[in-house]
Image: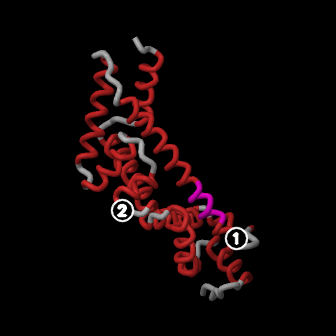
Amino acid sequence: MAAQVGIYDLIGEKLLLQQIAMGDETAFKSIFDTYKARTFTFVVNFIHSKADAEEIVQDTFLSLWQNRVSLTTVEHPRNYIYTVVRNKTMRYLSNVARDEKMMKVVWANMQIEVNPTEEALQLRESRELINQALSMLSEQKQLVFRMCREQGMSHENIALETGLSKSRVKNIMVEILKYIKIFLARNSLIITFLLNVLSFFKNNPN
């Protein structure tokens, strides 16, 4: 039977981790129930997206279970769990920043008219796919995306213009970027390919 965990029950939590390391699902559920809400609040305060925060929390506990053998050496369970969820949150934010930066490059270069070479046709095809993806979004999301990408407005200025909160504008951009990535992947167009094409045009302007 899994040990009962108190808020600051260090010994009890260490015992639970030892039990989890041996494959005890009841002990795992006890730790999960204890920390799910706390870690969710921790994550959502950073990323301001409940859906993504839920994914990060689930991924955190999935990671704990998959790597449960190593839990026997953990001295401070609470610190360990928060370290794992913090690292996954930082990785998420890093990926969002990278994706947004890549999309800025792609979108900016797609506004440039190029000669009708084979690469240009591929670029035009990708442009059409992105526009197709955008057309499937709500009017609000399309507006926010174009204000950000075409007009170069900051999240703060978009918020003032639309009446949305700054965090909501940021969340919308994150949702759009994730959607476009999935849409392109389903149509056999990956971001790295687009960047290679754009690199070709930069290195071969004529």
Q: In which quarter of the image is residue 139?
A: bottom left
x then y, percent, for residue 13 = 68, 80
The numbered dot on residue 35 is none
Q: Quadrant of the C terminus?
A: top left
Mark 1: which amino acid?
Answer: Asn
Tell me the magenta residue range.
83-90
Between 30 and 157, which is closer to the camera in this rendering? 157
Q: In which quarter of the image is residue 197?
A: top left
The numbered dot on residue 163 is 2
Q: Real-space Cα distance between discs 1 and 2?
A: 39 Å
- In the image, is residue 124 above or below residue 163? above
- Image point 34% across, 58% down: which residue? 162
- In the image, is residue 130 above or below residue 24? above
The numbered dot on residue 79 is 1
N-term mark: 1 or 2? 1
Outermost residue on the top side: it is: 206
The crowd level at tag 1 (other Cα within 10 Å; few <14, some 14-19, many 20+) is few
Mark 2: which amino acid?
Answer: Gly
- Image point 42% across, 63% down: which residue? 165
